[in-house]
Structures are given as structure tokens and as C-alpha cells.
Image (cartoon, rainbow, N blue to C red):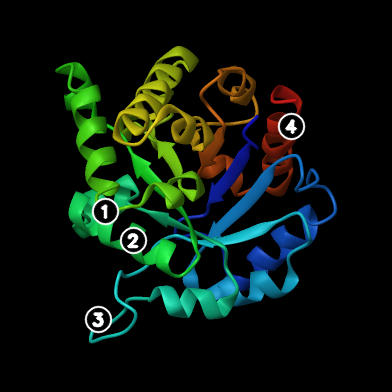
Amino acid sequence: MRKPIMAGNWKMNKTRDEALQFIYAVNKSLPNNELVDTVVCAPAIILRDLVKRKGDDLRIGAQNMHFDDNGAYTGEISPIMLQTTGVEYVIIGHSERRAMFGETDETVNLKLLAALRHNLNPIVCVGETLEERENNLTNTTLERQVLKSLKGIPALDVPSIVFAYEPVWAIGTGKTASAQIAEDACLYIRELIAKLYNKAISEEVRIQYGGSVKPSNIDEFMAMPDIDGALVGGAGLESESFIKLCEACVVEKK
């Protein structure tokens, strides 16, 4: 049984004081880490503060990083810098990074290689736009993104990668893929990994769903056999909501 993983992506939200208030509110209420991995991916400026104050059952992640260890990249953050803050996870290739900041399949691959090289647990985001879905290109898009992201990744490292299926048309729009749509996409991602490596490895990889997930619908997704958790935005900003989402992972995946 794959251990479920619930990750909150705060995006560009929360001041330092707001972030610490959240951490103190959830620290003693999250499920045991042996049952579910709970992760908060916060703005880089407050990562160290959160690492120092998090409870034993919470992990802290970054929302992005550069693929080089250092260099003339004004405003960027290297994997070594993340390592020294004590974070354990990093989101790679979020659709907002792809659409707004020029992230490509190639840079996603370079960042993935760098994350693994520096023992950071990567959450790799993939997903189709509304136009691609309407033109029956969902699987084509997923195949391109998954296979290009895994270029040069040795089989031994693959189980430590988390994939997040995030249909672009469902992120921050209030629209939600049905549980079956999400399951079909996650299963397809698993099948792609099996073809590239083998079935045993694909069965170890955890795949999240992301896209307007909230406490009222999380049970539908967690009941699906190939969905191992969620990557949430707005619903992960409030402590009570985040706790409920984490608890749902444990209940549904026992």
C-alpha cells in the first residue's frame, strides 16, 4: 500500500506571522506521519521559519527552484539553498510556472535531476489545458510531460518522485475533474511509468490529484485506487481545512 501524501501549495500567500499561526494551529492535530505524509509548500522567504517550528508530523516544501547549484540567476533559488533550510520537498513544473514564467518540459527535467541529486523529494506537476482536453489531447499531453520529465532518471530514483495530475482547467477555477476523470489520468500516468521502467516501479510511485480539491470532495478522489493524495491550493490555506484534508487521506486509504 502506497502511503498517501497531502500537500498544500500556498502559492504567493501568507506573511511570516500568518504562516507561523497556521503551523502552530496544525502541529498537534495532523495525522501520524506513519499513516500519511503531510506537506506545506510555502514561499521561499519563510521556509526556514517553518522548518524550525513545524511539528514531527509535518514536512515543509518549496514551490520552485533552479536546476543549477549556483550562478548568475538573479532572483532564483538553488537546490543547495533549499537543502540548507531543511526543506524536504519541492514542487516542479506547476502549470502556473509553465504558463507565466516559461517553464518547459526540458527545464522540468533538469530540475527533477537536480532535486534527486540533492535528496529533495520532487512533486512533479503535469496536466492538460482546457483546449487540449476538448481536442482529446489529454493523454498526448500527459505522455509528453511525463516521459520528458523522466529523461535520464535511473529506475532506482523513480519511486521517490511524486507526480501531481493537475488539469490546468481545474486549477483555481472552481471547476473540478470528476473522480473518474482524475483516476483515468492518474492510471495513465502510472501506465506510462510502467512502460518506461516496469510495473513494480510504477506501483510504488505516488500520484496526487490537484484542482479545486476541498474537504467536501476529497473522499471521492481518495476512494480511487490510483490517486494517492492531493496537491491543494486554496483549501490548504486554512488550518482547519488542511487538517480535514489530511485526515481524509488516512481514513480512505487504510
The residue lying toward the viewer, choosing from 194 and 124, is 194
Residue at the spot x=19%, y=55% of the render? 106
The x, y position of residue 64, in whole percent, is: 39, 62
Name the disc covering residue 152, or none. Answer: 1
How many residues crowd around disc 2 within 10 Å: few (fewer than 14), some, or many (20 or more)? many
First-in-chain label (3 vs 1) = 3
Q: Which residue is mark 2?
A: 113
Residue that sits furthest to the left in the current view: 135
The residue lying toward the viewer, choosing from 102 and 205, is 205
The x, y position of residue 170, in whole percent, is: 37, 30
Disc 4/disc 3 C-alpha distance (Å): 41 Å
First-in-chain label (4 vs 3) = 3
* Amino acid type indicated by mark 1: Gly
Q: Are marks 2 and 1 in contact (CB under 8 Å)?
A: yes
Disc 2/disc 1 C-alpha distance (Å): 8 Å
Name the disc covering residue 250, or none. Answer: 4
Residue at the spot x=41%, y=22% of the render? 187
Above or below, 241 relative to 77: above
Q: Is residue 199 visible?
A: yes
Q: Seen in the image, is 141 located left or right of residue 97?
A: left
* Amino acid type indicated by mark 3: Tyr
Q: Which residue is mark 3?
A: 73
How many residues crowd around disc 3 within 10 Å: few (fewer than 14), some, or many (20 or more)? few
Above or below, 84 relative to 157: below
* Amino acid type indicated by mark 4: Val
First-in-chain label (4 vs 2) = 2
The x, y position of residue 211, in whole percent, is: 44, 33
How many residues crowd around disc 4 within 10 Å: few (fewer than 14), some, or many (20 or more)? many
Q: Secondary structure at mark 4?
A: helix
First-in-chain label (3 vs 2) = 3
Q: Secondary structure at mark 3?
A: loop
